Image (cartoon, rainbow, N blue to C red):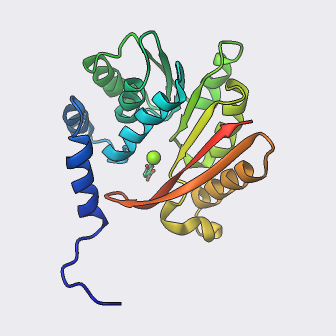
């Protein structure tokens, strides 16, 4: 293969795609600033991935979205942008101080009446949602060790046809070396569950960008 000196890399291409197709999105600059100001980790989804979430919610025609892992509300706001008027989003956040930052960002983006933040361990708050209307779309992006449990909650709180997206399923390729890292093992187990369970029709896509080598799983509940 010909060597390309100074050839652009994934991160630069990602910047180009964000600038060309996403343009930051109104209000998202303030969300990113809030993450930095609060000293929170910069692990929000890439702008291109956020816009993908918005498009998937719209393609699905989802009226009720469940998110597990709010952080500062970056993906929450993208998901909410995909909802029709009268749509609803429930998002689960472990840490109250992160939820407070997210609530401010969600309110500033105009989704205060659309979004409910459930504060606490999702495995404690998700059971409170049982018995309500099913969710049409579930985005899992929280502590990776509980991914398998979160998939099972998606099955309980969804319906046939519900779309499930799970972030960070490649984890720099460590899913092939699950002994290296408990998170890698948990992510791999969740993928294997999606692949073997009769309840999911699933695939996964690798991504390379500003956040390195990762990817997401996409499934529907059968
Ligand atoms: C981490 C978590 C994420 O959800 C992500 O997208 C990237 C990194 C992390 O915990 O390191
Ligand atoms: Mg993530």
Res. 71 image quadrant: top left
Q: Is residue 203 left or right of residue 142?
A: right
Q: Which residue appears at 21% of the width and 48% of the height?
A: 20
Q: Is residue 79 left or right of residue 152?
A: left
134 is higher (above) or lower (below) than 68: above
Viewport quadrant of the C terminus: top right
Viewport quadrant of the N terminus: bottom left
Res. 79 image quadrant: top left
Q: Is residue 85 left or right of residue 5?
A: right
26 is higher (above) or lower (below) than 88: below
Residue found farthest to the right: 198
Residue toward you, 148 or 193: 193
195 is higher (above) or lower (below) than 200: below
Res. 50 image quadrant: top left
Is residue 101 something one can see in this rendering?
Answer: yes
Q: Position of residue 132 (x, y in %)?
A: 66, 12
Q: Which residue appears at 65% of the width and 69% of the height?
A: 179
Q: Which residue appears at 27% of the width and 89% of the height?
A: 3
Q: Is residue 199 left or right of residue 174?
A: right
Residue toward you, 154 or 198: 198
Q: How many marks?
A: 0
67 is higher (above) or lower (below) than 14: above
Is residue 41 something one can see in this rendering?
Answer: no
Q: Position of residue 187 (x, y in %)?
A: 61, 54
Q: Which residue appears at 44% of the width and 31% of the height?
A: 95
């Amino acid at each position: 293969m010909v060597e390309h000196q100074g050839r652009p890399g994934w991160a630069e291409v990602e910047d180009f795609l964000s600038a060309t197709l996403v343009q930051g999105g109104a209000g998202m600059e303030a969300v990113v600033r809030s993450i930095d100001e609060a000293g929170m980790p910069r692990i929000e989804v890439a702008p291109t991935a956020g816009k993908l979430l918005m498009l998937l919610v719209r393609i699905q025609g989802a009226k009720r979205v469940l998110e597990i892992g709010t952080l500062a509300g970056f993906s929450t706001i993208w998901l909410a942008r995909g909802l029709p008027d009268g749509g609803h989003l429930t998002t689960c956040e472990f840490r109250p101080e992160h939820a407070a930052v997210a609530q401010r960002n969600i309110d500033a983006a105009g989704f205060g009446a659309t979004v409910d933040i459930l504060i606490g361990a999702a495995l404690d708050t998700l059971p409170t949602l049982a018995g309500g209307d099913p969710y049409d779309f579930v985005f899992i992006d929280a502590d990776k060790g509980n991914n398998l449990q979160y998939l099972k909650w998606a099955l309980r709180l969804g319906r046939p046809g519900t779309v499930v997206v799970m972030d960070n399923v490649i984890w720099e390729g460590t899913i092939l070396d699950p002994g290296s890292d408990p998170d890698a093992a948990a992510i791999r187990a969740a993928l294997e569950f999606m692949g073997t369970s009769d309840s999911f029709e699933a695939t996964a896509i690798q991504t390379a960008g500003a956040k390195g080598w990762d990817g997401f799983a996409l499934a529907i509940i059968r």
